[in-house]
Structure formats: structure tokens, C-alpha cells
């Protein structure tokens, strides 16, 4: 292995020397192990070797500019197979955002520029220059400052980076967010340089200067620098201001949230085990409750009341982590300041929006005789207020733990860290959401083979399609009295088309069916068959159901705050609700579902909460 490493280093040094002699660049003393290993023979992709992600122990022995500067401890990520250089992860992901393309389109370049124009208020094209203030990116609290990344694209570009993202997502996500900021800065700098180059070419004498600026800008971008321009305050041909170095530097103070999506294998909620901790999971389910949006301190600036010493304190890992304010002054004379001298400066601190959701298994996926299981979700920034109760979602998140003090609602140390709860603390599992997609849950995502599609087309052309479908409903139940019942159930399963009139009134497209009959006439069998046949079906009994259990309820959590929790009709949005023994229900509970049956909404006005939830289902 040592001989192979030496041979690879010699060959790489020869390649670097050959490329340097063929394409002269400004002389810089950089060790080979500190730069990405690029193979430019394929112009469509830039590939990286896996060893650049691992922290090299030969940096100090190779000499060069970085030999005397070992990476700081916080820039190293400990994995089972060794440490990972977070700086290399940041560089790799930045180059992925800049260079990944499909055919001739740079996918993530366009997304970054669109996100920047959306957050800065500039809706013009990428070639149009904006005013100086509009190039300053938004703060981390801006819900529009996010970038969706497909996990399959990361695996296609760099398999080593994909392995880190799946195995240690919590450790590298902050580096990915910083890499997105770096990529946006380099893109904006390239835009400014391109406009300046066009103006220099128009003047007839600036080609050499533009080439020199290009080389300096590329060198600066390769180091992860700010990419500041050499001509601050320049204007375009239309007389509008281009981004200045100060504007580009302001982007470094902002954050871009990375949202992940992709076709990961779904993990059922009841199958989460200890081996899934701190890994990336994709879990389907239905949101049954949502808390109010709170503000969580992301970065706090503290100031000593005596010596005016200022410090920046970051929050602990995880959305439920706190901020540890120093109890002693860290200034030049800590003895004179006394205990707990620091006070928070709110105007110079950064906060992010946070919300907690409760995800439950879909009712149709709960095994018979089992209670549906649920898990706590923590969403931040752009994901808050995106999933009201009753929404079916596919969540991509990181399974973690947090310490919850017994008897209290406040979270202790982040992700199961040693909190101050003592012996009475309880470890609670939660899912830190890094991506969320709404799922209709009505079978629209089902896939069929070409042979099945052709069979459906042939069946639809038959004139006796209605009797065929009606005979397929509960074929074991026969009798002359069942023909009309089965036809009614077929119409209810297929449903109609909802209409919205010109004056804004909405007409529902679903019908409700009431089965009346003597005992032993298979009413309950029809009911259970229909709820099993429907893609979304909820079965309940009238005697054991209440108005709150069928519609929605307002629940008080441990902190004393109220939040909504959807009932059976909200959970069955887009499907069928089967209520057995309807005549045994209390009249007050029966009246509560009239709104859901007619208007297909559930309106709640309790405890200062006024909300309307969707209940687009047939009863």
C-alpha cells in the first residue's frame, strides 16, 4: 500500500508539472494532497478520488504553504474508518454544484441563481445587473434561501461523497451549506467578470486585463476565497450597478439550507432500530399534529457588562440543543467581572424558525391488532408550516435522540448528549427533517406494467364495464338485494369530479353511502371490504368514536401550548371512512361530522386556535 501511494504521488506530481508547463498559471506553492485530484480527459464531468476526502497524514511532510497549518479539530469528522477532512467535503460539494449538468444544462447553477434572485428581490435574468443592495443574500431566517439536491445526482458525480451523506449526514450538512454559499459567491463573481469583460472588449483595449482578472478569479475561487472583484463599483452598459466586493462578502454571512430528495428505500416507522441512528432515512407517514412556529437561537452574541468583551456562541448540535453562555468572563481581567457577566445582544444574534410535527403510520399500513406508532419531527427554516395535520408526506431525515427532562417539556442537550436532567432524564427519539415531499396517498404513485395498462384499456372499452366492476365488489357475498348495493359502492370508490363555479363556490365530487338493513345482511362485511379496497381507508365504530376522534381536537402539550391533532376523517383525506353502527353514535357526535360530509372541511375554533383542515373523503 505504501509503494502504491508513493507511485501515485510521483505520477501525480509529474502530471501537475506537465500541466503547469503546458498551461502556465501563477506560481503557488500548494501540496498535491491539499487540492482535488481532477481528471480533465472527460469534459462532461470532474471526478475526485476518495483519498482526498480522508484526512491525509502526510500534509506536513510534503512541505508547501499548508505544511505549517494542520486542520483545526472542528474541521475533522471522525468516522469508523478514519477522520474526514470537512474542508475537502466542502470543496467537493462546491464543485458538484458548479459542474454537475444534464446534457447542456448546469442544473444547480440555475437553481442557485434563481434562489438568489428570489431572496434578493431581483426577478430579472442572470445577465441583468441589479442594484448594490439587492446582491446581498438573505439571512439564515429567510424561508426562501434553500436548495433542493437530488441524492442520485450526488452519487452519479461522486460516490465517496454519497457514502458520507448516507452514513454521517449530521456531520457534513453544515459543510454542505457553506459549500452552497461558496458556489453562489463564485457564480456571482463570474457574472460580474463576464459583464466587465464584455465592456472591456467593447472599449477595444481590455482583453489582456480581462484575461488577467480571469486567472486571478479562478485562483481565488480554487482557494475558496471571497472572489472579490478588482473593479469595485463598476457599472454595466445600461448604467446599473454591478455587485461590489462588499456585496459578495455579505453572502458569506448568510446560510443556504440544503434539502435532500431522492429515491431512497423507504423505512417503515415501526422498523427504526438502533442501527439507524445518525443515518439518513426516508420514512412515509401522515402528519397528525403540528406545533406553533418558534424561534430558535442559531448564533448568539454575548457581551460582558463590565469590560464589554464580546463573544459569539453557537448552539449545540441538533434542533433541541441549547446555547451554553460562558459563566466567567473571557476578557483580559476575568477576576474583576464576577460570575455570569455576559448578557445576550438580541439585535446581533441569529435566529431560525423551528416547528415540531408528529408523524404517524398510515392507517392502512398498521398491522391488525397493533397500535399505530408515531415519531417526533423537527423542521426548520423553509420547512415550517408546510405540512398541516392530515398531510401525507415522505420525510427524509436523520434519526437522533435528545434528552427530555422528566416532567418538563424543555429539551436538554442535543441528540442525546449528556443533558442536565440527571437521573430523571428520558431519551426521546426524533427525526431531524432535511427533506419533505407531499404524497397524495391516493394511488397516483402506483406503477403498472405495459401489459396491465393494455388490459385496462381493453376493459374500459367494454360496454358491460359497470356490471363487471359491481360483481367484483365482495364476490363472496351474493343475493339479489346486493346488486344495487355493490353498484353504489363502485360509484363511491371511483368518485366524481369536484367542480368550482365561477362565483367561487366549490361542489364536492364524492358521495356518501348509508347502508340500512336487518342483522346478518353483511353490512359490516361490505364496510370492511370497501375500506380495504380503497387506497386510503379508515374503519371505526360508532359507539367507540367521539366527535373529537372523528374530526379534530386541540391538545395541550407539556409546555402548556395548544396544538391541533387530526381525527379519523382528517387522516382519511382523499379516501374512505367507514363508520360501523352509525345509529349507536351519540347525537352530538353525529352532528359534528355533518360539516365534513358536506363541505369536506373540519373547522376548529378553540383555545385561541382557528383553523380549517381538509377532510376530502367519502363516508
Image: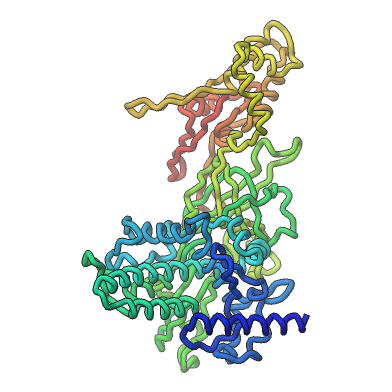
Q: Which residue in the rendered view is the most extreme toward the front? A: 22
Across and down, in percent, residue 467 comes to 64, 12
Residue 285 position by quadrant: top right
Residue at image point 47% right, 54% down: 293
**Can you say whether 425 is above or below 547 in the image?**
below
**Can you say whether 186 is above or below 458 in the image?**
below
Nearer the observer, 370 or 125: 125
Residue 480 position by quadrant: top right
Q: Left or right: where does residue 74 sit relative to residue 233? A: right
Across and down, in percent, residue 340 comes to 49, 81
Residue 136 position by quadrant: bottom left
**Can you say whether 484 is above or below 2 in the image?**
above
Q: Left or right: where does residue 195 sit relative to residue 374? A: left
**Can you say whether 504 is above or below 245 in the image?**
above
Q: Quadrant of the N terminus?
A: bottom right
Nearer the observer, 209 or 425: 209
Residue at image point 69% right, 18% down: 472
Q: Quadrant of the C terminus?
A: top right
Across and down, in percent, residue 319 comes to 56, 63
Amino acid at each position: 500500500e505504501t509503494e502504491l501511494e508513493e507511485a501515485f504521488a510521483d505520477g501525480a506530481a509529474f502530471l501537475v508539472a506537465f500541466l503547469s508547463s503546458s498551461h502556465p498559471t501563477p506560481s503557488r506553492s500548494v501540496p498535491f494532497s491539499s487540492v482535488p485530484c481532477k481528471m480533465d480527459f472527460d469534459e462532461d464531468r470532474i471526478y475526485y478520488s476518495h483519498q482526498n476526502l480522508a484526512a491525509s497524514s502526510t500534509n506536513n511532510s510534503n512541505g508547501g504553504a499548508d505544511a505549517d497549518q494542520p486542520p483545526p479539530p472542528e474541521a475533522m469528522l471522525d468516522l469508523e474508518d478514519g477522520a474526514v477532512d470537512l474542508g475537502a467535503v466542502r470543496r467537493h460539494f462546491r464543485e458538484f454544484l458548479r459542474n454537475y449538468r444534464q446534457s447542456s444544462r448546469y442544473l444547480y447553477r440555475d437553481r442557485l441563481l434563481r434562489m438568489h434572485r428570489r431572496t434578493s428581490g431581483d426577478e430579472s435574468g442572470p445577465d441583468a445587473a441589479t442594484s448594490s443592495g439587492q446582491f446581498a443574500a438573505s439571512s439564515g431566517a429567510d424561508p426562501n434561501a434553500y436548495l433542493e439536491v437530488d441524492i442520485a445526482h450526488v452519487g452519479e458525480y461522486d460516490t465517496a461523497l454519497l457514502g458520507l451523506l448516507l452514513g454521517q449526514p449530521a456531520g457534513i450538512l453544515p459543510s454542505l451549506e457553506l459549500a452552497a454559499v461558496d458556489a453562489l459567491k463564485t457564480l456571482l463573481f463570474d457574472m460580474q467578470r463576464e459583464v466587465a469583460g464584455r465592456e472591456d472588449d467593447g472599449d477595444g483595449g481590455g482583453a489582456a486585463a480581462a484575461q488577467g482578472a480571469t486567472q486571478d478569479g479562478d485562483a481565488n475561487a480554487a482557494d475558496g476565497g471571497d472572489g472579490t472583484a478588482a473593479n469595485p463599483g463598476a457599472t454595466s452598459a445600461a448604467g446599473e450597478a454591478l455587485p461590489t466586493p462588499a456585496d459578495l462578502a455579505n453572502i458569506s454571512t448568510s446560510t443556504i439550507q440544503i434539502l435532500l430528495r431522492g429515491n431512497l428505500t423507504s423505512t417503515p416507522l415501526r422498523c427504526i432500530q438502533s442501527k439507524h441512528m445518525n443515518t439518513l432515512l426516508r420514512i412515509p407517514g401522515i402528519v397528525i399534529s403540528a406545533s406553533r412556529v418558534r424561534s430558535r437561537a442559531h448564533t448568539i452574541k454575548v457581551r460582558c457588562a463590565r469590560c464589554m468583551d464580546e463573544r459569539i456562541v453557537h448552539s449545540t448540535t441538533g434542533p433541541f440543543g441549547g446555547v451554553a453562555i460562558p459563566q466567567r468572563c473571557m476578557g483580559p481581567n476575568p477576576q474583576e467581572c464576577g460570575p455570569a457577566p455576559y448578557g445576550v445582544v438580541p439585535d446581533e444574534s441569529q435566529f431560525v424558525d423551528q416547528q415540531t410535527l408528529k408523524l404517524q403510520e398510515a392507517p392502512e399500513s398498521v398491522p391488525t391488532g397493533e397500535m399505530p406508532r408515531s415519531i417526533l419531527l423537527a423542521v426548520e427554516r423553509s420547512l415550517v408550516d408546510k405540512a398541516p395535520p392530515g398531510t401525507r408526506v415522505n420525510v427524509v431525515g436523520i434519526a437522533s435522540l435528545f434528552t427530555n427532562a422528566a416532567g418538563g417539556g424543555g429539551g436538554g442537550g442535543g441528540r442525546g448528549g449528556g443533558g442536565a436532567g440527571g437521573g430523571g432524564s428520558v431519551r426521546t427519539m426524533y427525526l431531524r427533517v432535511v427533506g419533505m415531499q407531499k404524497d397524495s396517498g391516493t394511488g397516483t404513485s402506483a406503477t403498472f406494467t405495459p401489459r396491465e395498462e393494455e388490459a385496462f384499456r381493453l376493459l374500459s372499452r367494454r360496454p358491460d364495464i359497470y356490471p363487471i366492476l359491481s360483481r367484483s365488489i365482495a364476490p363472496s357475498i351474493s343475493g339479489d338485494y346486493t346488486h344495487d348495493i355493490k353498484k353504489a359502492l363502485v360509484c363511491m370508490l371511483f368518485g366524481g369530479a369536484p367542480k368550482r363555479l365561477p362565483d367561487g363556490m366549490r361542489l364536492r365530487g364524492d358521495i356518501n353511502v348509508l347502508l340500512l338493513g336487518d342483522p346478518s345482511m353483511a353490512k359490516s362485511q361490505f364496510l370492511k371490504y370497501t375500506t380495504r379496497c380503497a387506497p386510503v381507508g379508515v374503519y371505526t365504530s360508532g359507539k367507540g368514536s367521539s366527535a373529537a376522534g372523528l374530526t379534530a381536537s386541540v391538545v395541550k402539550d407539556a409546555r402548556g401550548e395548544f396544538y391541533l391533532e387530526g381525527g379519523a376523517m382528517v387522516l382519511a383525506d382523499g379516501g374512505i371512512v367507514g363508520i360501523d353502527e352509525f345509529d349507536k353514535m351519540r347525537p352530538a357526535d353525529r352532528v359534528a361530522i355533518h360539516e365534513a360530509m358536506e363541505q369536506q372541511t373540519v373547522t376548529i375554533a378553540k383555545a385561541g386556535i382557528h383553523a380549517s383542515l381538509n377532510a376530502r373523503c367519502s363516508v
